[in-house]
Image (cartoon, rainbow, N blue to C red):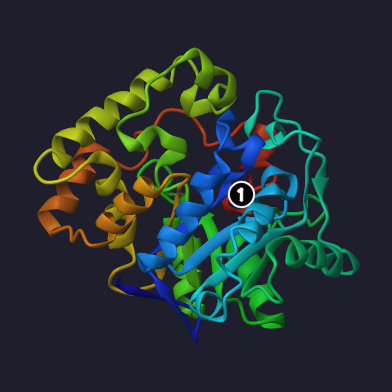
């Protein structure tokens, strides 16, 4: 697989594996993930050349890390050496994983205090069954950190953190439906030589080309503005326009993943994290990594889904407040 650069010294496959969807009983968007399928997906990803594995201590309230550890996929020296494990810490949720993805949207808070970091890390290492993680990052912005008064707060945050300790990569949502990173985050990362791991490349499932509204999804995605009544129809219409472009040679999902990768091809600095809970999802992601979009292809995609055409914000205001990437001077 084509390699991408994260910081000065790290090279990983262009597609990474996002593990939130295999978080056991509390899988993302309410779907119960099969543990055996999760282990098979992880092993299949490593065998296919996917080397970046992204998880978090709060995925399934620790269950996701336990699943990775129980799968033994990282316990052999050979497998561990070729895997780049990224762990997010500090997010405090209620007893249900639905705190982030469920209908209530309740979030307890964020803890990024220095004395809490070793505690979070110790639990993660134990659950993962490994002696180290490769990339360790805070999961959310601490609301107590006041940076709104700067002209470009997210760029300033990255610059300040990088001055204290070199940053390997910044993880942020980036897709055809979420392009805010192009304004401030990508330029500052490229100035400082920092890679970008893009999550949400399939827009919480809408850009798979197979998602359709249902009563079950209404419960688990209904709190997301882009899936809410009044917005979802307009956004699915954009997906249909994208389907016409994809019909030439691929699928909507592969096209959406390939588009994100194309945005980083010149600099070789963007890794697309694809959430997968089944081996077939890995196959689709690997196929997308091999898809090379021409300038004509990119122009057609741009016409189908112009920047700013999506209806609705990414998240409800309470969650937007925790996302530094959504903040600009005088606006969140």
Determine the image quadrant of residue 149: bottom right
Residue at the image point whose x is 62% and y is 51% from the top: 329
Q: Quadrant of the N terminus?
A: bottom left
Q: Secondary structure at mark 1?
A: loop
Q: Which residue is mark 1?
A: 327
Q: Is residue 132 visible?
A: yes
Residue at the image point whose x is 55% and y is 21% from the top: 222
* Crowd around label 1: few <14 · some 14–19 · many ≥20 (10 Å): some
State left or right for residue 155 relative to residue 111: left
Query: 58 and 115: which one is in front?
Result: 58
Residue 177 against residue 65 in the figure, above or below? above
Q: Is residue 153 visible?
A: no
Q: Position of residue 228 (x, y in %)?
A: 50, 20
The tally of labels here is 1
Q: Quadrant of the C terminus?
A: top right
Determine the image quadrant of residue 137: bottom right
State left or right for residue 328 relative to residue 189: right
Residue at the image point whose x is 41% and y is 21% from the top: 232
Q: Position of residue 285 (x, y in %)?
A: 33, 53
Residue 319 against residue 289 in the figure, above or below? above
Q: Position of residue 80 (x, y in %)?
A: 56, 76
Q: Residue furthest right?
A: 115
Query: 104 and 16: which one is in front?
Result: 16
Residue 204 against residue 91 in the figure, above or below? above
Q: Residue furthest bottom?
A: 9
State left or right for residue 114 relative to residue 328: right
Q: Position of residue 156 (x, y in %)?
A: 63, 67
State left or right for residue 67 relative to residue 191: right
């Amino acid at each position: 697989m084509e390699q991408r650069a994260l910081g000065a010294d790290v090279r990983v496959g262009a597609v990474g594996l996002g593990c939130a969807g295999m978080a056991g009983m509390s899988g993302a968007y309410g779907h119960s993930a099969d543990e055996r399928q999760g282990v098979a997906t992880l092993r299949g990803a490593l065998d296919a050349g996917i080397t970046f594995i992204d998880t978090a201590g709060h995925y399934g309230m620790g269950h996701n890390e336990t699943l990775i550890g129980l799968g033994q996929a990282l316990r052999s020296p050979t497998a561990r050496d070729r895997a780049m494990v990224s762990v997010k810490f500090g997010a405090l949720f209620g007893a249900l994983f639905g705190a982030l993805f469920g209908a209530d949207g309740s979030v307890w808070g964020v803890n990024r205090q220095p004395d809490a970091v070793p505690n979070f890390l110790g639990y993660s290492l134990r659950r993962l069954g490994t002696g180290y993680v490769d990339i360790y990052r805070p999961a959310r912005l601490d609301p107590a950190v006041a940076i709104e008064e700067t002209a470009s707060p997210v760029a300033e945050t990255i610059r300040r953190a990088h001055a204290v300790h070199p940053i390997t990569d910044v993880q942020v949502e980036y897709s055809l439906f979420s392009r805010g990173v192009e304004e401030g985050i990508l330029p500052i990362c490229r100035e400082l030589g920092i890679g970008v791991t893009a999550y949400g490349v399939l827009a919480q499932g809408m850009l798979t080309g197979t998602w359709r509204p249902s009563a079950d999804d209404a419960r688990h995605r209904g709190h997301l503005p882009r899936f809410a009544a009044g917005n979802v129809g307009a956004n699915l219409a954009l997906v249909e326009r994208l389907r016409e472009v994809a019909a030439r040679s691929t699928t909507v999902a592969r096209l959406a993943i390939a588009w994100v990768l194309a945005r980083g091809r010149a600099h070789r600095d963007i890794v697309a994290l694809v959430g997968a809970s089944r081996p077939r999802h890995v196959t689709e992601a690997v196929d997308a990594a091999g898809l090379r979009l021409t300038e004509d292809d990119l122009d057609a995609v741009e016409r189908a889904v112009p920047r700013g055409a999506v209806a609705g914000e990414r998240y409800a205001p309470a969650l937007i407040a925790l996302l530094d990437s959504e903040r600009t001077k005088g606006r969140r």
